[in-house]
Amino acid sequence: MIRVERLTKRFGAVYAVSELDFEVRPGEIFGFLGPNGAGKTTTLRMLAGLLRPTGGRALIAGYDLATHPVEAKALTGYVPDEPYLYELLTGREFLAFVVDVYRTRRGSEQIPRLLDLFGLEARADDRIGSYSRGMRQKLALAAALVHEPRVLLLDEPTTGLDPHSARVLKDLLRALARQGVTVFMSTHILEIAERMCTRVGIVDGGRLIACGTMAELREQAADASASLEDLFLKLTGGIEHEDLVRRLETDVP
Ligand SMILES: Nc1ncnc2c1ncn2[C@@H]1O[C@H](COP(=O)(O)OP(=O)(O)OP(=O)(O)O)[C@@H](O)[C@H]1O
Ligand SMILES: [Mg+2]
């Protein structure tokens, strides 16, 4: 369970996140959408306990991150947008290190299972410095799962994954949600959000401008047949697509 109350983060004069209120329940897969710079990563970093809010609060399974950070973090798995991995360790050593950090009993049993699941077994004993982008992403996903978190925070988790690995991840998230894990992920891939998220939230300029099931969003936009792409473009404004196409046609020599 994730609960956010008037959550705000200001960087100097910029309100990266402004008075966010929402709740994500166990078993839900919540898609967090929004244009570049909307405040998605900032929100995820606050939920992961890596960034202190300027105002409001965030709770993980009832634990306020401001007062009970250790309890909250122990229940959370976080995959950052740009994972920091120890280049000199092998993939297997890195996972063993993460298990040590969390001091989980079952963690070491999870390592071979996760390496196999993400197809990393063959390269598990090579240094991370030699990994491709997608392999790094898969290792970061595995690292977020070794301690069997109840809440998963994922920042654009399919970035760099090939179609096969993306499918593995989608199936895995669905299976975890069925087991009652709370899944919160940011994505720019609207097809993923539309097909696998139970609810979506759209942020723009740090504010939540829409939140609900696809049906609720269509109702809000008074457009029964709208795709998520239509709704996203309509709600987040900016240049209308047809306008842009017209400008490209006339401006480009
Ligand atoms: N450490 C920081 N210092 C100053 N400003 C920051 C910092 N981190 C983020 N910002 C600003 O906060 C706003 C939100 O950024 P954020 O990274 O949360 O966006 P995002 O929704 O994740 O975007 P993207 O889709 O590009 O990943 C932006 O205006 C960004 O420039
Ligand atoms: Mg981001």
Image: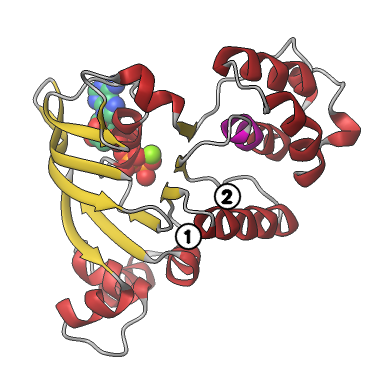
Whether the magenta-drawn stretch holds residue 82 is answered as: no
Magenta-tinted stretch: 140-145
Measured from the top left, where is residue 16 in percent x and y?
A: 19, 34
Circle 1: residue type = Ile
Q: Nearer the viewer, residue 26 or 213?
A: 26
Measured from the top left, where is residue 186 in percent x and y?
A: 40, 48
| Mark number displayed over residue 189 | 1
Q: Is residue 110 above or below residue 66?
A: below
Classify 10 Å Cα crowding around label 2: few (below 14), some (14-19), many (20 and above): many
Q: How is the image coloured?
A: secondary structure
| Mark number displayed over residue 158 | 2
Name the residue located 56 percent from the left edge and 60 percent from the top edge: 174
Which residue is farthest top?
Answer: 88
Measured from the top left, where is residue 210 in percent x and y?
A: 19, 63
Where is ligand 1, by quadrant? top left
Q: Secondary structure at mark 1?
A: loop
* Residue 15 seen: yes
Q: Nearer the viewer, residue 118 or 228?
A: 118
Name the residue located 72 percent from the left edge and 18 percent from the top edge: 96
Circle 2: residue type = Thr
